[in-house]
Image: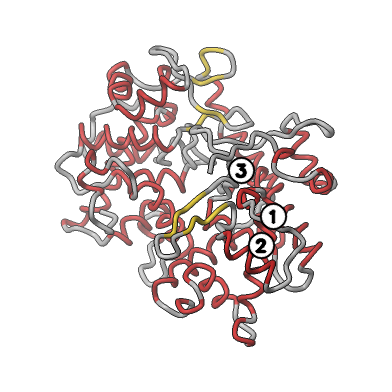
Amino acid sequence: MAISFKYWNECIDPLDMQALWNVPNVSAEWEDAGETKGQKVHLSRDPDGQVYLTQTEMKFHHMVAFQAVAEIIVRRHFTGKIDAEMICAIAELESDRQPLAQRYDKKAKATHLGIMQILPKTADWLASEKGYRAYQLKGNDSLLFRPFENIYFGAAYLIWLSSFDQKERSEEFVVRAYKGGTKKATHKSTLKYWQRYLSVKESLPSRKSLEGRKSVEEVSASLALAKKSASSQNTGGTYTYWDSVASPEDMEDMWNHPVVSKEWTLTGEKQGQVRFSQDDKKRPYLSRMELKAVAEIILIKHFSAKPLKVSVLCALAEIISMRFLSGIGPRPGIMGIEYSTAVWLYREMGFRAYRISSADDLSKPFVSMYFGASYLLWLLECEGRLQPPQYVIQAYISGPKNVNLQDTGPEYLKFEEALSYYEDTKDTKRNPRDQGSCTIM
């Protein structure tokens, strides 16, 4: 099913587009991004060209429009029947907010579509049998790639689940049934999904504002300060170049990586002039493909005999730095390793494959990845014995003194979710450590 959208205007009706412009936060964010009312509004795309509405907290300004769609749908059709935050959290878990997401279900012998991963036959059933006819497919399943239609049917299904079998159901039942069906709503197979849902819902921007945490504007401002060092690395125009933050040897390894070289060639990169991807604020970041390649190279060259996994390093980078070159807030670089920690690892623990002379060195992806792996290995082997994975990950994220093995907390759940982005890959033959195991070390 070949469907492609470049603009919001291509996947929603004019009246829905007007409704989004009428939401103050949406119009402000779109105007800040250079969009103009009456003109086509661009959808965000990841480095692989996939349309997305970002999941990370630092990019909640992109989420404003998506959350507005959910709130508009609820206000128009389901007032008092469903919480928009439930829709947003489930959409993040189901599709990472990608409108064009598809997933084939072998059991159902059908494909889940769109932001809420709705089966076409479920949408048809909701319309024909349950009376949800504000939007109708009429045999055109591709309409489920449109955000308003998809969210409408996803919300309708959640409402149906909330009174399944003519009983008032709990939020936990509804969420777990959405994942595994009503028969699996109390089965252990859907428990982790419920836990991840709670973590995601807790992190939604509306909750942050209500509970006195940082607002979207405050997060954006702190990120702007954190990224000041990135501008000093620009060597041409507004771009930051890989060649300015990686050694010739590391760049050769990247070009020799088949997946990286293919991707860079397709995007028109040339040796000596490889650009980083940027968000709409011109902040350079690594694609998941690039991040994975850096982790592979570091582990193969420097930790080949150690029990470290590529997927673990990548998942940590995902939640700590969101893959931004300069990191987030006070934690520099993609792995969030403090300068003092890197110096200690270099001087006292003998990890000297990369020289570190200033904090700016930690904005170099190979340097940050190397010292991140070094610190992870030290945590794993500290006290003269192998530590359990839960301890190692919590200690890396929050510090060894803040580990609580009785309560893993939302950060560990986010790590497990990020881990799934890197474990189920097509090139596991390149990484035997990542094959056939559900452990994290």
Above or below, 128 against 371 in this view is: below
Locate residue 218: give its quadrant. Answer: top right
Q: Nearer the viewer, residue 330 or 281?
A: 281
Residue located at (60% from left, 80% from top)? 170
Q: Which mark is residue 153?
A: 2
Residue under pointer 3: 59
Residue 142, position as x, y percentages in the image:
61, 48
**Gap between marks 1 and 3 measured at Cα:** 24 Å
Residue located at (51% from left, 13% from top)? 235
Residue under pointer 1: 149
Query: Could you tell me if the residues under marks 1 and 2 are in contact, i.e. CB atoms within 8 Å?
Result: yes
Residue 366, position as x, y percentages in the image:
34, 30
Locate residue 149: give its quadrant. Answer: bottom right
Q: Residues within 10 Å of mark 3 (few under 14, many from 20)?
A: some
Q: Nearer the viewer, residue 117 or 272?
A: 117
Identified by mark 3, the residue type is: Lys
Q: Earlier in the sequence, mark 1 or mark 3?
A: 3
Q: Nearer the viewer, residue 97 or 339?
A: 97
Please tell me how many numbered marks the rendered image carries: 3
Residue located at (25% from left, 34% from top)? 347
Image side of residue 393 versus residue 8, left or right = left
Q: How is the image coloured?
A: secondary structure
Q: Which mark is residue 402?
A: none
Above or below, 297 against 100 in this view is: above
Image side of residue 72 versus residue 301, left or right = right
Residue 79, position as x, y percentages in the image:
79, 69
Identified by mark 1, the residue type is: Glu
Above or below, 174 against 423 in this view is: below
Q: Residues within 10 Å of mark 1 (few under 14, many from 20)?
A: many
Residue located at (44% from left, 30% from top)? 363
Image side of residue 362 versus residue 37, left or right = left
